[in-house]
């Protein structure tokens, strides 16, 4: 029998777990909005191209694009530090499968820059513009990047002003000044409409001890800091973009687009991808932050990527045959059975990230729990186990794609 204090503690622990799961779901939906911003860029570009050429001229002779990887860079220009990128996002679009992968890269990530040695990833743009930034990310992640899109922060201000501002709940007092960069941030907490300059200051603010990104929960791989603020702002911006009043502002947004965006993407590809993103199901968006931790090397602070985890993330987001992550739990009490099953699944190409015990050892039947669109994978795993496994869709987010709980029916 639990004491009142123990009951209260259990309730608090359960509420904390629920809050982490809610936060994880919210972050996934916010990352999907990053794709919405990329879609906006592509579709405004589409409007310009089709206005000039007409849809027939664009479509003739253009085959449907294959999976396309796009490096999106938010660049400091003008009165700000002209040589670095504050925002680095890699977007992978598969028009045929209607799938999108999004990887948010902290700007302080330590990488090897070709010809320059190890440095923060945002300096690649300073050394060699978008081409060197693209080459750096290609070498680091081991994938080909087809195109880049550079968004000028000054142009970003104009886009927000053209929309009439963006309403957002500023979570706290934000004051920061850097005369060298011409950066003067002074925002008060509370719900308010931010103009272009205020919006830019909101997403640039990083004087809260978390910096660009900070690992706030290693188990759930949740991150805080400016990355979180950028996601919150994108959510608010998306709400503005879907308002009916935006239609009348499209001509002005096109002008803003011309001044704010630089890309090497051909016109016909832009149209094709823009149309593919427009019809995309946001449930098929996979999104992650580069896994890692903050640390120091010498006297410099970096975001240090976990290379093993990063390989799995890249495989999942940017390849047609993603790695399936699996958790194997012993639910029948038989010693060593979970390890044995894990080795078997690894031999079949599955990524077994956790092996351990279930909450109890009285499972009569093996259970295979899956998340979202992983039912077919769950059934294939159940077939490999040669048991009468129960296949269950998880009502909550799982830490892996599939969780296997081994029951007494299992025969090895």
Image (cartoon, helix red, strand yellow):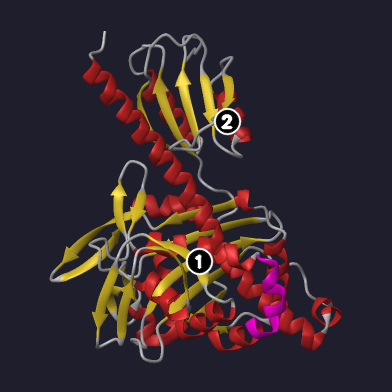
Examine the image and state in which quarter residue 138 appears: bottom left
Q: Nearer the viewer, residue 198 or 204?
A: 198
Q: Nearer the viewer, mark 2 or mark 1?
A: 1
Magenta-drawn segment: 243-253
Q: Is residue 91 magenta?
A: no
Q: Nearer the viewer, residue 21 or 116?
A: 21
Above or below, 206 against 313 in this view is: below
The numbered mark at residue 378 is: 2
Mark positioned earlier in the residue sequence (2 or 1): 1
Q: Position of residue 1 (x, y in %)?
A: 26, 7
Q: Nearer the viewer, residue 220 or 354?
A: 220
Q: Which residue is mark 1?
A: 167
Examine the image and state in which quarter residue 171 appears: bottom left
Residue at position x 68%, y 69% in the image: 273
Query: Alpha-carbon distance for marks 2 and 1?
Result: 43 Å
Residue at position x 46%, y 11% in the image: 363
Q: Is residue 244 magenta?
A: yes
């Amino acid at each position: 029998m639990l004491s009142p204090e123990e009951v209260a503690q259990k309730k608090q622990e359960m509420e904390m777990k629920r809050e982490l799961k809610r936060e994880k779901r919210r972050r996934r939906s916010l990352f999907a909005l990053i794709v919405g911003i990329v879609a906006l860029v592509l579709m405004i570009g589409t409007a310009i191209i089709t206005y000039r050429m007409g849809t027939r001229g664009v479509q003739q002779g253009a085959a449907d694009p294959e999976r396309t990887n796009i490096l999106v860079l938010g660049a400091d220009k003008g009165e700000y530090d002209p040589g670095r990128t504050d925002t680095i996002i890699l977007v992978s679009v598969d028009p045929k499968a209607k799938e999108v992968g999004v990887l948010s890269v902290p700007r302080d990530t330590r990488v090897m820059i070709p010809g320059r040695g190890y440095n923060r990833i945002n300096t690649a743009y300073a050394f060699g513009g978008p081409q060197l930034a693209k080459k750096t990310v290609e070498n680091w992640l081991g994938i080909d990047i087809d195109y880049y899109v550079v968004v000028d922060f000054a142009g970003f201000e104009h886009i927000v002003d053209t929309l009439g501002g963006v309403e957002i709940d500023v979570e706290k007092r934000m004051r920061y000044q850097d005369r060298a960069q011409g950066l003067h941030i002074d925002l008060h907490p509370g719900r308010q409409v931010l103009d272009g300059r205020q919006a830019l200051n909101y997403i640039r603010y990083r004087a809260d001890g978390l910096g660009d990104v900070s690992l706030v929960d290693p188990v759930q791989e949740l991150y805080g800091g400016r990355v979180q603020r950028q996601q919150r702002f994108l959510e608010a911006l998306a709400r503005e973009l879907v308002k009916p009043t935006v239609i009348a502002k499209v001509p002005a947004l096109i002008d803003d687009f011309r001044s704010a965006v630089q890309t090497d993407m051909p016109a016909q590809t832009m149209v094709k991808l823009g149309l593919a993103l427009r019809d995309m199901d946001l449930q098929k968006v996979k999104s992650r932050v580069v896994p890692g931790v903050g640390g120091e090397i010498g006297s410099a602070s970096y975001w240090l990527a976990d290379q093993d985890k990063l390989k799995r993330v890249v495989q999942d987001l940017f390849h047609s045959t993603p790695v399936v992550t699996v958790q194997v739990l012993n639910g029948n009490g038989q010693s060593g059975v979970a390890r044995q099953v894990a080795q078997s699944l690894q031999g079949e190409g599955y990524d077994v990230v956790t092996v351990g015990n279930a909450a109890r050892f009285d499972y009569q039947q093996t259970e295979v729990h899956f998340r979202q669109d992983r039912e077919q994978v769950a059934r294939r795993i159940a077939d490999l186990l040669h048991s009468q496994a129960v296949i269950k869709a998880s009502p909550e987010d799982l830490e892996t794609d599939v969780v296997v709980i081994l029951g007494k029916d299992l025969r090895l």
